[in-house]
């Protein structure tokens, strides 16, 4: 018998700056991209913009197209059950030079603008779904 897992919808961004660098965060021992859970009443695109702003302090964002959707399973300690997270990833650009502010309540320890070499280095210590979406980003 197959048990259906609870699905969590999330959204985030692959944010680039004027130099073409990619915004990356370091959380819980891994390099990641800013994303988070959809709040009631908001669109997925609104969620992506809000989560990038909350997690990084970058609010001056231009929303681009949806790049792709990734899926991963994990144990949600808040609801005490296995879930599948469906993350919607948007291309975004920032127009400003805002100070990067890690959202420490979300265990974000570090944020950086990564060039191609740094992105490749980060991919050695990240999650499979992040590698997948960054590969898709790099192929565009």
Image: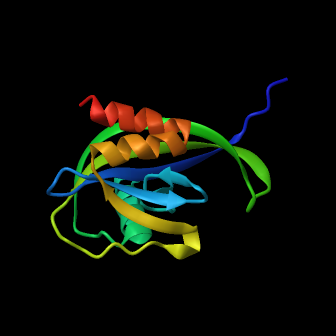
82 to 97, vertically: above or below: above
Q: Looking at the image, can residue 12 be seen?
A: yes
61 to 31, vertically: above or below: below
Looking at this view, is 19 or 3 the one in front? 19
Q: Quadrant of the C terminus?
A: top left
Q: Quadrant of the N terminus?
A: top right
Looking at this view, is 17 or 79 the one in front? 17
Which residue is at 60% across, 39% downward? 72
Residue 76 percent across, percent down from the top left: 72, 54
Which residue is at 51% across, 37% downward? 129
Looking at the rendered structure, the number of numbered marks drawn on it comes to: 0
Looking at this view, is 41 or 11 the one in front? 11
Residue 10 percent across, percent down from the top left: 50, 51
4 to 107, vertically: above or below: above
Which residue is at 35% across, 52% downward? 13
Residue 101: quadrant of the picture: bottom left
Residue 84 percent across, percent down from the top left: 64, 41
Q: Looking at the image, can residue 38 be seen?
A: no
Residue 75 percent across, percent down from the top left: 74, 49
Side of 73 where 86 appears, left or right: left
Looking at this view, is 85 or 41 the one in front? 85
């Amino acid at each position: 018998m197959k048990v259906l897992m609870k699905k969590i919808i999330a959204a985030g961004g692959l944010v680039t700056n004027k130099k073409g660098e990619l915004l990356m965060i370091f959380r819980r021992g891994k390099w990641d991209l800013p994303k988070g859970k959809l709040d009631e009443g908001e669109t997925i695109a609104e969620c992506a913009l809000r989560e990038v702003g909350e997690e990084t302090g970058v609010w001056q964002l231009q929303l681009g197209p949806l790049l792709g959707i990734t899926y991963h399973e994990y144990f949600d300690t808040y609801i005490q059950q296995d879930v599948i997270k469906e993350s919607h990833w948007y291309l975004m650009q920032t127009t400003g030079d805002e100070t990067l502010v890690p959202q420490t309540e979300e265990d974000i320890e570090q944020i950086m603008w990564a060039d191609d070499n740094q992105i490749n280095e980060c991919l050695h210590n990240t999650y499979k779904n992040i590698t997948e979406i960054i590969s898709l980003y790099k192929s565009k």
